[in-house]
Amino acid sequence: MDRIIEKCKVKIQLEAEALNRVSQQVDEAYVQAVDAILNCKGRIIITGLGKTGHVGKKIAASFASLGTKSFFVHSCESLHGDMGMIDKDDVVIMISNSGKSQEILSMLSPLKIIGTKTISITKSKDTPLAKGTDITIKVDAGPEIDHMGGLAPTTSSTATLAVGDALATVVSEMKGFTRNDFALSHPGGALGQQLLKEYQEPINK
């Protein structure tokens, strides 16, 4: 049992180190991304596939709950009709750790024709995805923590989620989003009921 506990501690420590590594990579691209999101007249659309797709869904949900209209579009589905959900006034955040996933790269040309502003989140600014988007946020989290030599997205997906949380919360703060606003976007559960009661504001008012 002690061996398992120690192994789990090491894994968590490695992911914490990965987050610290990524925090040192924050640069002007974050400012550009926040400005693009704040000035967006449409919606913030997150796209990805595989594990980054799952992370993208959570990032989209965080933006929405914190006052920025957002939803997720699967990269594969976008190539079979869902591109119609995207408008020139939107901002599309494209997530791919490798920056080489063909499905997400295939979205670039249609998005340019639509005229949509694009932001990529990828491990290097030299990837094909980075070179094809307007803004690139580098997320180089270092080695994955699986026992097979870095096959399973672990540190990379954790770091990408943290970057998404950073963007969503900074944008929300700069918009002046309040606890009262959060109560209206999150009326369910103990948290929502507590906030609604605190402000004594009926949800159907």
Image (spheres, rainbow, N blue to C red):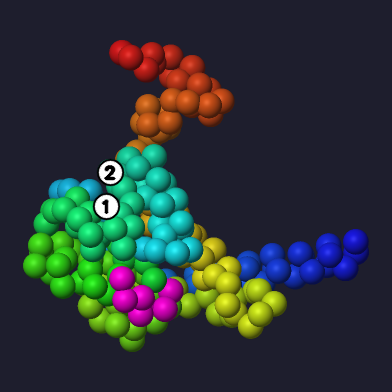
Q: Main secondary structure of the magenta part?
A: loop
Q: Amino acid at mark 1?
A: Ile
Residue at (46% x, 56% y) in the render = 54
In the rendered image, residue 41 lying in the magenta stretch gets the answer no
Could you say which is closer to the camera, residue 25 or residue 101?
101
Quadrant (top left, top right, bottom left, bottom right) of the C terminus: top left
Instruction: Say which quarter of the image contains residue 8.
Output: bottom right
How far across and how far down the image is residue 21, in percent?
A: 54, 75
Please tell me whether residue 73 is drawn above or below residue 108 in the rendered image: above
- Measure the alpha-carbon separation of dots 1 and 2: 6 Å
Quadrant (top left, top right, bottom left, bottom right) of the N terminus: bottom right
Label for residue 44? Answer: 1
Residue bounds of the magenta highlight: 97-103
How far across and how far down the image is residue 123, in percent?
A: 43, 78
How far across and how far down the image is residue 52, in percent?
A: 44, 64
Residue at the spot of label 2 = 69
Q: Is residue 175 visible?
A: no
Instruction: Of the two numbered discs 1 and 2 on the same chain, state the one appearing first in sequence.
Output: 1
How far across and how far down the image is residue 159, in percent?
A: 51, 66
Residue at (58% x, 68% y) in the render = 154
